[in-house]
Image (cartoon, grey):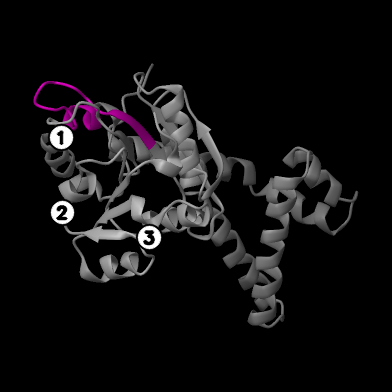
Amino acid sequence: MSTLQNSKLAFIGGGNMASAIIQGLLKQGITSGNVTVSEPWDINREKIAALGVCTTTSNVEAGGEADIVILAVKPQVTQSVCEELATAWSQRSTLPVVVSIAAGITLKSLQEWTKTSDRRTAHTVRVMPNTPALVGEGASGLFAGTDVTEAEKKLVDALLGSVSKATEWVDREELLDVVTGLSGSGPAYFFAMVEHLVASAEALGLPKEQATRLATQTCLGAGKMLVESSDEPAQLRKNVTSPNGTTYAALQTFESLGFKQIVDKSVQAATHRAAELGGTPRKS
């Protein structure tokens, strides 16, 4: 298996997530000529072409001979795209590694749809990235088929590492739904928190612009502390909380309003919805 630097990479779909990964790869020194993107929409294709990579409207032209194929398409077109590529791959002696960021499409479906005419199946990895990948601060959950080798996992790690600061492999496919409820949907939870912090401060008299700057920087600073500190989140919380102080008063209010239960139920709701949308097989 070749290294990422000398692999031919094909992105099927040139939307925001594909663009983010490509930009991350180029910053890591990946040769732009080794990246080809298939994108039907002119405006997206022009944006991708501006990065210096190869573009086309043909999925087969992009992915027919690639070493790694990244499926960055909408779930409803994933089957037709996979079957089109599988037909082209039937002539190959070695199949590519397929990395799917198509939300909710199970490994079983991907393996079935990428089966060649002689019944070979591409080694496939499912990925649940999140939108902070757009600024190089993503978190991604990954699940691999049993045929995916350690060398192939390292390639995918390097691929996702271009935009994700955390890449976590899960050992059961249904756990990708939990990743969806945690980090996939998670940015929106923090955006909502900051939204409400700003509104509360504004209602108490602080100008909205000042409240927004203070709240967003507080969120960024707290996140950086979480990443860089060796302390658990609970300890970091305790470090800020003086007995009977201002933070204590706020946290007591959180507790009285059932904050823990709200978070639990919210993550569970997102996880269960992900399972419903994807039809993920679940173990009893």
> Which is more toward the observer, 198 or 213?
213
Q: Residue at x 45, y 43 (%)?
A: 5
Q: Residue at x 45, y 29 (%)?
A: 153
Three-letter amino acid code at the position of disc 3:
Asn
Q: If you read the primary sequence from the N terminus, does the residue marked by circle 2 or circle 1 appear first?
A: 2
Give the Cα distance between marks 2 and 1: 14 Å
Q: Residue at x 19, y 47 (%)?
A: 76
> Which is more toward the observer, 282 or 125?
125
Residue under label 1, please give it: 86
Mark 2 residue element: loop
- Marking on residue 58: 2
The part of the chain drawn in magenta is: 109-126
Is 33 part of what is drawn in magenta? Answer: no
List x then y, in percent, for residue 50: 35, 70
Number of other residues with Cα within 10 Å of mark 3, as a class: few under 14, some 14 to 19, many 20 or more: some
Judge from the rendering whether residue 239 lies leftward or rightward of residue 6; answer left or right: right
Residue 269 visible to the viewer: no
Residue under label 3, please give it: 16
